[in-house]
Amino acid sequence: MSKFALTIQSRSTRGLVAAIAGYLSEHGCNITDSAQFDDLESGTFFMRMSFSAETGAELGALAEGFAAVAEPFGMDYAFHDEAARMKVIIMVSRFGHCLNDLLYRWRIGALPIDIVAVISNHMDYQKVVVNHDIPFHCIKVTKENKPQAEARMMDVVEETGADLIVLARYMQILSDAMCRKMSGRIINIHHSFLPSFKGANPYKQAYERGVKLIGATSHYVTSDLDEGPIIEQDTVRVTHAQSAEDYVSLGRDVESQVLARAVHAHIHKRVLLNGNKTVVFPASPGSYASERMG
């Protein structure tokens, strides 16, 4: 039995859900999970449905036939094979906690993706990556060679057919051109102190200010540095009794968890862009996708 997902973005109007459900029913499909959101401010409707095709209906035929249903409502829609694994490139610099966490979740099946390459501007994690039988590309980046370096990165993207780039603490700013070309397909992680604690040693700055909560934010990358649409966030409480080193350790843990949850939501087509924001549908309670991602 084939398992598919359907994502929809449309102007909000009566009859949408009935038309969608009716089409799937007519083609021998059984809806197993459905989530929707009506943005009253923008008048935009968002939906994600999981369904099984019990009669052997093919994804391409379903998508082609759905055009007649979508056109009167002005729907933007996409059908997805839930068994298909997204091709992912991970980029990292010298902090490896997020990379190691993603590799572990991938290895145990908690992140059902194909990691087709790891790109770094340093050699620190070459052995770790190669030991996982994943191609490693060291691409040095300087002010002088940045266009050439990014061209090499894009060559890797095109050669591997990667659908997503994950910046697992990659400490280089991507150009506006690369951000535009990969719009909605680059996910980043950063500590949630921005803009309060910018620059070097943000956790030390937070410690010196006596903050009580530290956290992390994962978002899509845009040309506006660290201001792209937010996918996932979390915090952890700290106290006066903890050291700056404790802040760093706790911060790395929450960064790893938040990035993994953001990637998980993206690969399962549960994130829909809504202007400068996102609509993030939760995983169904009975699915493995609700798995202990943190």
Image (cartoon, helix red, strand yellow):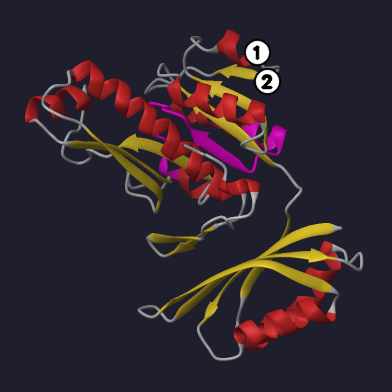
Q: Is residue 68 magenta?
A: no
Up-down relation of residue 23 to residue 180 (above or below) = below
Q: Is residue 239 left or right of residue 81?
A: left
Mark 2 packing: few (<14 Cα in 10 Å), some, or many (20+)? Answer: some
| Circles 2 and 1 in contact, beta carbons < 8 Å | yes
The image quadrant that residue 216 belongs to is: top left
Viewport quadrant of the N terminus? bottom right
The image quadrant that residue 171 belongs to is: top left
Q: Residue furthest bottom?
A: 14
Foreground: 170 or 39?
39
Residue 178 visible here: no
Point 65% across, 88% down: residue: 72
Label 1: state its secondary structure: helix
Q: Which mark is residue 87?
A: none
Q: Amino acid at mark 2?
A: Ile
Q: Which residue is mark 1?
A: 130
Q: Which residues are magenta?
A: 156-177
Point 64% across, 43% down: residue: 163
Q: Which residue is mark 2?
A: 134
Up-down relation of residue 167 to residue 244 (above or below) = below
Mark 1 packing: few (<14 Cα in 10 Å), some, or many (20+)? Answer: few
x, y percentage for residue 229?
39, 54
